Structure formats: C-alpha cells, structure tokens
Amino acid sequence: MKEKILIVEDIFIEANNLQMIMERAGYTVSGIAASAEMALQMIGQNRPDFVLIDIYLKGKLTGIDLAKQLRQQHIAFIYLSAYSTKQILDEAKATFPYGFLVKPFREREVLITLEIARYLHANSLEAVMRNRDTKEREIQPMLRRYGIIGESQRLQQTMQHLSVVAPSDTSVLITGESGTGKEKIADLIHRLSGRASKPLIKVNCAAMPAELIESLLFGHEKGAFSGALERHIGKFEQASGGSIFLDEIGEMPVDMQVKLLRVLQEKEIERIGAMHSQKVDVRIISATSRNLEKEVADGRFRMDFYYRLNVFPLHLPPLRERREDIPALVDYFLEMHCRNIGRPLVTVTRRVMDSLILYSWPGNIRELEHLIERSVLLCEGPVITQITLPEKIEYVPVAQEERVKTMQENEREHIIDVLRRCRGKIFGKGGAAELLSMNVSTLNYRIRKLGINKDELRMPG
Ligand SMILES: Nc1ncnc2c1ncn2[C@@H]1O[C@H](COP(=O)(O)OP(=O)(O)OP(=O)(O)O)[C@@H](O)[C@H]1O
C-alpha cells in the first residue's frame, strides 16, 4: 500500500484534480484542507505520510508557515504554486521541501515528483536514524557522507539525539574536549535544519578582543565611536534566517553574557549607535570545552544564560573513551590524506594500529588527524611501520597483551568461531545464522563488514 497524502489547497477544482491523480496511482488521500489551520487540525487527527501544500492559502498562515511545522513533526511535504517571487522561493527553499511543483502540472510530473520525494524522505539521515531496524546497516554510510566516522555506542547515541534536534529551532549546546568534533557537529546540525540554505556564521568567542565583541556580534553605525568610519553589520545580522555558532562560549565575558541573554529572550539586536533595535531570526548553536556548570558555580558564567543556551545538550565523548572508533578514523584519514597529495593508499601495521588504539589522545580526533597527515607525508613505502607518539604524553597503563578487546574484535572472533563449528554453513538448519539468531542477510553483511574471509575458517593448528 502506498502512502497517505493530505492535500492543502484552497481551490477546489485543483484539489479535486490532484486527488484523482493520487488515487489513480494507488495513493490514499487522507483529506483536503483549504487552509493551513485546517491542515494542522486534520494532521492532529490522522497523520499523513506526505503533504502537498499550496504556498498561497486563505487564512493567516501561509503554506510556508505550515511547512515549518511539518518539518518539526518530521512529515514530508511538497509545494505547489502557480507563481513565486525570488523571496518566496528563498523562503520555501529554507524549509527544505521534498519537491516543488509549478502549476499547471501534468499527471506524470506530479507522480515523478512524489516518487523522488518518497525516496529522499526514506533515505534522509534523519529517517535512517529514526528507524532502528535499518540503523545498523545504513547509518554508517550515511554519516560517512557527512564526514562523521565512528561506530561506538557513545557516538551513535549523540548522533541519535542530533537527528532529533537538528530540524527544529531549538538552541543546542555542544560540550566536549578540544578536538572531539564540536564544530563538525554544529555544521551537521545546520545542514540538517530547515535553515541550511541560509548562512551558518561561526564566531570563536575566545579569539575576539573584549572591547570589540559587542560591535563584532551586533554591528555598529558609522560614527558610533571613534574609529567607526563605516557602518558594520554584525555576526547576528549576517546569520539572519540561518544559524550562529558561538564556539568557546565559556570565554564570553559576563557583561556580554547579559547582552546575549537579551538577544536570546527578545530575539532583537541593537547595532551600537543605532536609534532602534531590530528583530533577528537566528538559531543559536554554542559549544564549549569547559564545564559550564562549574563555571556557573564559581560565578564566572551566568546561570540564566546557561539555561538559555543549554536547551538541548549534546556531548561528544573524548577519543580515549571510544577507542573502538580509532581504527576506522585511522583508515579514513589515511585515505583522505593520500588522496589529497595524490599518492597510492598507504596502510599501517597491526603493531602501529595497536599503539594508536592504546594512546590516550589528549588532543582527540584533531591530534589523530594531524599525526596521520604527518605520517603519510613521511612514509616512503606502502605501509607505515612506525609512528612516533608525543613523548611527554603517557600511554594508557595497560600492557599490550592485556589490552581490552574492542566490541568489534569480540564480535569478529565470535562469528569466526561459530562459522568454524558450522563448517562455513551460513543459512539453513544448523547454519551460523540460526545459531547466532541473526537473519542471513545481516550475518552476511557483518561478515563482509568485519572482513572475515574463508581462510580464517580453517581450524587453527
Ligand atoms: N567523527 C569524526 N569523523 C571524522 N573526522 C572528525 C570527526 N570529528 C571530528 N573530526 C575532525 O577532527 C578535527 C577537529 O574537529 P572539530 O574542529 O570539529 O573539533 P572541536 O571539538 O570543535 O575542537 P575545538 O574545541 O578545539 O574547537 C576536524 O578536522 C574534524 O573534521
């Protein structure tokens, strides 16, 4: 059975025409709403899979207003419109529709647009992450496309939370040590939000001179202070309609925290020297490597500001707490840096990989990335046989032979063990899939993924 579709269109003949097209193609039309308000009511009673929305509607809300709400509810939508100005088109794009149909449309066009929309919706990062059954299989390539490497439970949990918050306008506070990927995650939140077509403006709060912060963030009028030779548009205005990333927010001086709090509450800014304040529509994503709760307790960070920023916290664990991600990250950076300098792929020996897994990575992923980049440049053959880790920094005090096996290594060994017992038989009675209570395709996928080959199935010795 195909999806349920709600049509939001105030011209009866057009709505009726669409309904016929949909039903002929086997879709169920769950209703026709003549306004956005009516549509919201109908969605509350009977949730559709897709909504076709006319942009210009009777009533207070436009189709674009409705779309913003649908995005928050994770319902896919396609716009219908007879004409559109550049401004309307920009606004529509910012809501990330799954399609746009220009009236008058032909049946074939409508059906193809819907097919493509169904595909996009089913394959969006968010959809994949929401569907627990497909997660195992599809989440990695999807995250990889966004340059996020790591299969550890800890990282996956953070990504799950990210997929929930990204499409909304909620303020997010990303915490984690330096180099854990906070900026990368901020990029992803913006790209997965309805604001993706608008700018993401990044501000490093630690790098701004205290006396210039206000003018850099909010802007100033010409002549507002000596040296203000021209009008300056601040970062908040530059981010209009998009997001602002306040990195190292823990470094923000207390007097500026008060001013920023007002911006968050009133959604208004005032250029220095301006007569009036003005509205801004900006989503705030902030990050810190400090423990802000401690900063609040010590009186260095305002509690009210902290709570405003921390509506949705996302934590990135340090690399030493997710060592199982190290091999995949090493391979990723090896491939990336070899490609960058146009040389054939190099690998590392098992011994080198073990030492990388054991190291404590105080600089986290950034440190690992730089080390691999350096090693690729220095390596002359196809294999890196030695990597010198910084001397001053201690190895984790676990002897090599006592190293705790990663979950992947355990899984790999367990699957090999079972396959040996079944003499390589995977499906059918007494096969490995049955013994492991896994379905055959999942087992085959894991075998490929873990790089298990036939030679390993021979009994040792
Ligand atoms: N999961 C990941 N997969 C691949 N690369 C990653 C991942 N996370 C971070 N990186 C890379 O590691 C480097 C550091 O990441 P990023 O700058 O986002 O860290 P950060 O936490 O913002 O650091 P800082 O607090 O010092 O600003 C970047 O080059 C980034 O692309």
Image (cartoon, rainbow, N blue to C red):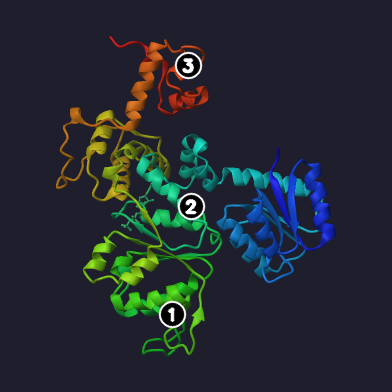
CA gap, disc 3 and disc 1: 66 Å
The nearer-to-camera label among 3 and 2 is: 2
**Mark 3 residue crowding within 10 angstroms, few (<14) / some (14–19) / many (20+):** many
Q: Where is residue 120 in the image (x, y as percent from the top left)?
A: 61, 46
The residue tagged 3 is 426
Chain-order first, disc 3 or disc 2? 2
Q: Can residue 95 be seen in this view?
A: no
Can you say whether 110 is above or below 220 in the image?
above
Residue 452 in the image, given as x and y percentages of width and height: 40, 22
Q: How many labels does the image show?
A: 3
Residue receiving disc 2:
164
Mark 1 — residue?
A: 219
Q: Nearer the viewer, residue 411 or 390?
A: 411
Residue 388 seen from this side: yes
Q: Residue at x 44, y 74 (%)?
A: 265
Q: Is mark 3 on a helix, strand or loop?
A: loop
Earlier in the chain: of badge 1 and badge 2, it is: 2
* Amino acid beneath label 1: Gly
Residue at position x 35%, y 22% in the image: 414
Closer to us: 42 or 240: 42
Q: Where is residue 226 in the image (x, y as percent from the top left)?
A: 36, 90
